[in-house]
Amino acid sequence: MFSSVAHLARANPFNAPHLQLVHDGLAGPSSSPAGPPSAPRRPRRLAAAAVEEYSCEYGSMKFYALCGFGGVLSCGLTHTAVVPLDLVKCRMQVDPQKYKGIFNGFSVTLKEDGVRGLAKGWAPTFIGYSMQGLCKFGFYEVFKVLYSNMLGEENAYLWRTSLYLAASASAEFFADIALAPMEAAKVRIQTQPGYANTLRDAAPKMYQEEGLKAFYKGVAPLWMRQIPYTMMKFACFERTVEALYKFVVPKPRSECSKPEQLVVTFVAGYIAGVFCAIVSHPADSVVSVLNKEKGSSASQVLQRLGFRGVWKGLFARIIMIGTLTALQWFIYDSVKVYFRLPRPPPPEMPESLKKKLGLTQ
């Protein structure tokens, strides 16, 4: 499968332009055999230098593996860093009478459990979201290549928002299967006093009480929460980056330094994160309550919470998810920079489409 994906990636319209030239045979020793000896030398040297600056080929196995590693760091580290905020948010959702707001939630938690209590659930959070990040970012790159080649160069540009949505939804489907067991354990630890304090205590107890079902009964609500979240996260980020370079940044991306490009990445990530939090919050409330209770279904929890109940903790989640999403994209892009991975610029309209639309002479 991956070898065919790597082959398709070479003709992918989202590939870097200079790599596309090399793969299409337009830049190389035999590109202009009939021309003057001096004419092709400069383009050939530039193309070769551009290829050599990258550590791997776009769409190669190494490329996808390092993208997955970037996802592990971006999701695992950021979610673990905000465990205290996540803990308070979950407790507000499952017990709003006791935890009346974000500041009150921190106050009550500190009074009852101390500072160490704010770190409850850090282990399943780190493991679960590292696995989720591996699948989310790694498979996104894979599905982006597959779907863009299915559409063709022109349609991939015209329907790029739909392409981002489809690729991210496909990736998140698998990412949530990887996340579900640790998410279930995390919520039990954080929201059921006296149930368990560590993953080592929680996992065997959950299996003894309910079997494997305990770890995967929340996968459907996870899909409800995470797939819309991830679709918004990737599509909004991609289009926001495109808009920032087009309307806000005073110079083309190719002229921006890597630190300047990473600033754009962070800003676009935060904007995407705010929308992500709003879209996915009702399902997040259902997941929190469902993993706390035994024998309840997602529809029963949703009916009991009502419209106002599913929006409890939204402000805390906007702060958490906005910051998380911005940091995730920043870390992910930084990993690409560090390992010298291809980082194609925002897509541009293909020349063939410009001719069809009469935009070129």
Image (cartoon, rainbow, N blue to C red):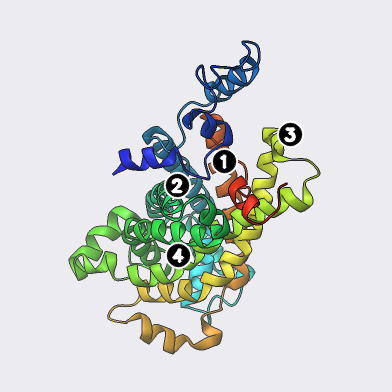
Labels 2 and 3: the sequence-earlier one = 2
Horizontal side of 20 relative to 261 (left or right) equals: left
Q: Amino acid at mark 1?
A: Asp
Q: Amino acid at mark 2?
A: Glu
CA distance for labels 2 and 3: 25 Å
User: Element under label 1?
Assistant: helix
CA distance for labels 1 and 4: 21 Å
The numbered mark at residue 226 is 4
Q: Residues within 10 Å of mark 4 (few under 14, many from 20)?
A: many
Q: Amino acid at mark 3?
A: Glu
CA distance for labels 2 and 1: 13 Å
Towards the viewer: 116 or 126: 126
Q: Residues within 10 Å of mark 1 (few under 14, many from 20)?
A: many
Pointer 3 residue: 255
Residue 218 screen position, x and y as percent:
34, 70
Query: Can you tell which of label 4 and label 2 is closer to the viewer?
Result: 2
Q: Residues within 10 Å of mark 2 (few under 14, many from 20)?
A: many
Labels 4 and 2: the sequence-earlier one = 2
CA distance for labels 4 and 2: 18 Å
Labels 4 and 3: the sequence-earlier one = 4
Pointer 1 residue: 333
Labels 1 and 4: the sequence-earlier one = 4
Pointer 2 residue: 141
Query: Can you tell which of label 2 and label 1 is closer to the viewer?
Result: 2
Residue 151 screen position, x and y as percent:
45, 56
User: Element under label 3?
Assistant: helix
Towards the viewer: 152 or 306: 152
Query: Which residue is located at x 57 percent, y 48 percent?
Result: 329
Q: Amino acid at mark 4?
A: Gln
CA distance for labels 4 and 3: 36 Å
